[in-house]
Image (cartoon, helix red, strand yellow):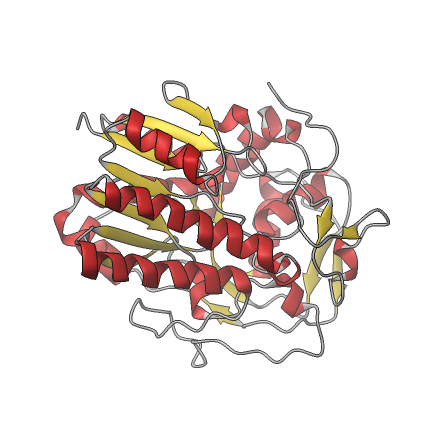
Amino acid sequence: TGKVALVTGAAGFIGSHVAKHCMDLGMKVVAIDDLSGGFLSNVPEGVLFKKGDIKDAVFIESLFVEHKISFVYHLAAYAAEGLSHFVRSFNYRTNLVGSVELLNQAVKHKIECFVFTSSIAVYGSINDLSQMQNPERTLKTANPTQKAMVESTPPSPEDPYGIAKYAFEMDLRAAHELFGIDFVVFRPHNVYGPHQNMFDKYRNVVGIFINQIAHKQPMSIFGDGEQVRAFSYIDDVAPVISRGPLVPAARNEVFNVGGDIPYTVNELSAEIRSALGALDHPVANHPARLEVVVAVSNHDKIREVFQPPEPIDLKEGLKRTVEWYRSRGKFLSPVEFENVEIKEKMPQSWLRDDLSEAAVCTGSRIGEVKEEL
């Protein structure tokens, strides 16, 4: 297209793939990341990479002044529903205030379209690992009937991460109404694949299972393992997001995006054992957690507007993921917080002897970075 695209979170999982697909579409890509949760080895060759924080309004302004940006693809976020309860201020500063700094400049410089990657978390408690492990909580969701969630399902976020995502969705719409800026919102779910940090213990069951097998730990299955989820391979998500501003019918709309085929957690664990050649790897059965039994999204709307190719099946997606993990992913580092704002009611598996409370959580990574490849 020859257009200039600003991609935030470009050293992260989904953002790095979106940046590459934008280049494949002929865009010039300015890629930014603060490297608090991403890795330089994820950044695709050919982009102009700048390290910086989306909360830094002066830094963000300089990008818009220096480059004639047509499209913003905003993927930078700290994406852990469960942990967000314990880093509330950090969550809102990063996921909401940082987003607003981008939107301010996008409005001022009259960009053509703002693409925002939201989350399935706007629908309620689905992947909140801290709530699942807290027996004093009650489960609410916008999807009490267990049917596939559609875009018209009224959002009902419960964790600070989902609240921040939905708040910015509303702010985008408000900016559109007043200033005329166009937007496209995508709500992905359970995305996995190359560039994913398999050592993230706060989220994503695919990474958790692969990490447990790699470290010869039993796979943790809660309850009977018959919870149903649809898992989204990255190549079923990132190409569609990158096309967002190029499809006129997508402007100022919200789309669920991701996998269609539901699997139980037991089926997923069997597929991952097979992909890793560890058919006899042990499973540790734990008491049932508080969680939605069936959580899948409906994708009729995105199929009608984007006409994406058939999704990659779980077996093939896991095969590609494991190949990448063995060649590169195993060199990535665990990403944990040096401190949190509140430790009370954190799951025991997330606590560390050196984990402290702080008035201002920095979100800093602990330990040494094992990569740069």
Does 6 sit above or below residue 151? above
The quadrant holding residue 142 is bottom left
Residue 99 seen anywhere in this rendered image of the structure = yes
Residue placed furthest toward the right? 353
Quarter the C terminus occupies = top right
Residue placed furthest toward the left? 248
Residue placed furthest toward the front? 58
Residue 262 seen anywhere in this rendered image of the structure = no
Q: Residue at x 20, y 50 (%)?
A: 181
Looking at the image, residue 368 sits to the left or right of residue 18; the answer is right
Q: Report the front residue among 148 and 112.
A: 112
The quadrant holding residue 170 is bottom left
Looking at the image, residue 323 sits to the left or right of residue 370; the answer is left
Looking at the image, residue 220 sits to the left or right of residue 317; the answer is right
Q: Residue at x 64, y 24 (%)?
A: 371
Quarter the N terminus occupies = top left
> x and y percent of residue 323 in the render?
55, 30
Q: Report the front residue among 79 and 317.
A: 79
> x and y percent of residue 277 in the render?
64, 38
Q: Residue at x 30, y 66 (%)?
A: 151
> x and y percent of residue 57 in the render?
42, 40
Looking at the image, residue 181 sits to the left or right of residue 195; the answer is left
Label tally? 0
Q: Report the front residue among 177 and 347.
A: 177
Q: Residue at x 52, y 36 (%)?
A: 321
Does 162 sit above or below residue 238? below
